[in-house]
Amino acid sequence: MKTLQLLLTLTILTIYGCSNSETSIITMDTHDDINVENFTESLNYTMNTDTQVNLPKMIEGGLDVAWFIVYTGQGDLDKEGYIAANDNAIAKFDAINRLVSDYAPDLIELALNSDDVYRIQEKGKKVAMIGVENAYPIGLDTSNVKKYWEKGARYMSLAHNGHSQFSDSNTGERDGVYLHNGLSELGKQMVRLLNYYGIMIDISHPSKEAIRQMIELSKAPVIASHSSARALRDHSRNLDDEQLEWVKQNGGVIQTVALGNYLTDREDPPPNIEDFIDHIDYMVDKIGIDHVGISSDFDGGGGIEGWKDASETKNVTSALRNRGYSDGEIAKIWGGNLMRVLDEVQNIAEQMQKGEL
């Protein structure tokens, strides 16, 4: 059965090509949620599952790099909660590892840095990377940061929808109730640890004050792995103009997210790829081409008309060209900016580990 699955996928690879047709553009989606039930011997991403991302869809649409997400919902801030959260996170790390090591090693590899991305992509394979959405599973033992780094985590957010032990969440806007007035003391320690290990700090879910403190404390650029422009859609998950400027001054990048409710409050017609490009245009105009990227939040609520799943990835490139972006600019937006930040974060980590920072 496994051999048949692989042959079918290789057939698709032959039909659609092994990488993005524009070889100078590496298409990178920084937020793709996963369910461990889709990472088994009998059901996995070598098959055209009903998920928005899998290998056949990546191949068809020309999506080169998928950041698979180790997501944990916010639970109780106690020992039992931390243990359950860590178990959930480890199960997702292990699932991703099974995909690249057991189910499809000839089709996809795990990248830990930008050099890996280029090396794997040049071999004609797809690239997997790992982000951690919500540091809650770290618990109170910050030595777990190193363990997650060893498992491949290359970005991490300190909160999700609900206040964590490290950071207030954007959800505090609903009732004005916050736990830490930004970051807790442990959260401030986490900023340094993430810098030290070369893990990008993701500001997409924390509160505005927590984001301000992260940027102030961080020695390295930050990312917003899946957020859009609040000026165009007033949602607490989006970034306002002041926050956009913070990220620009920090040298970071905002990965514009193709999730309908973060793009527009319009229901008819439903949110579409033009709404998505509107947000990219707005942020490029505000803070420059070097600070804007792309994410989908596929299998976590994302997907819009024109980019419903990974098989339609080429539509995004076409829409950017139609708005007047050059291929060089598109290459920056699709993955170049994010990899530049990753390089800077990892260079700073190396300096910190040598005692030079």
Image (cartoon, rainbow, N blue to C red):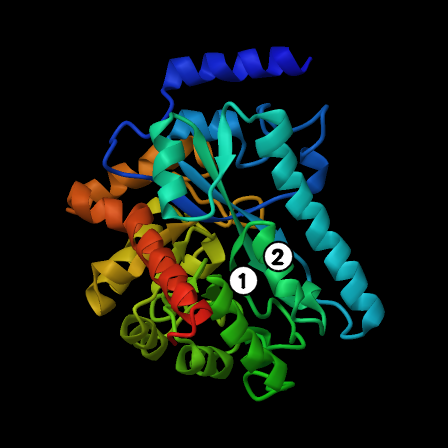
Q: Are marks 2 and 1 in contact (CB under 8 Å)?
A: yes
Give the crowd class for mark 1: few <14, some 14-19, many >=20 residues within 10 Å. many
Please say if 296 is above or below 160: above
Residue 209: image location, x then y, percent? 48, 84
Task: State the SS at label 2.
Answer: helix
Residue at horizontal 18 percent and vertical 41 percent from the top: 327
Q: Which residue is mark 2?
A: 148
Give the side of residue 148 with respect to residue 67, left or right. right
Residue 275: image location, x then y, percent? 34, 52
Give the side of residue 306 with respect to residue 79, left or right. left
Residue type, label 1: Met
Furthest toward the front, the residue is 354
Residue at horizontal 51 percent and vertical 68 percent from the top: 194
Residue 159: image location, x then y, percent? 59, 70
Asked if residue 204 can be seen in this view, the reply is no
Residue type, label 2: Tyr
265 and 40: which one is in front? 40
Residue at horizontal 62 percent and vertical 44 percent from the top: 34
Label number found at residue 156: 1
Q: Please state which of the two labelled residues, at mark 2 or mark 1, is closer to the viewer.
A: 2
Residue 146: image location, x then y, percent? 60, 61
Task: State the SS at label 1.
Answer: strand
- Cα distance between the residues tagged 2 and 1: 10 Å
Sequence-wise, which precedes: disc 2 or disc 1? 2
- For the N terminus, which image quadrant? top right
- For the C terminus, which image quadrant? bottom left
Give the crowd class for mark 2: few <14, some 14-19, many >=20 residues within 10 Å. many
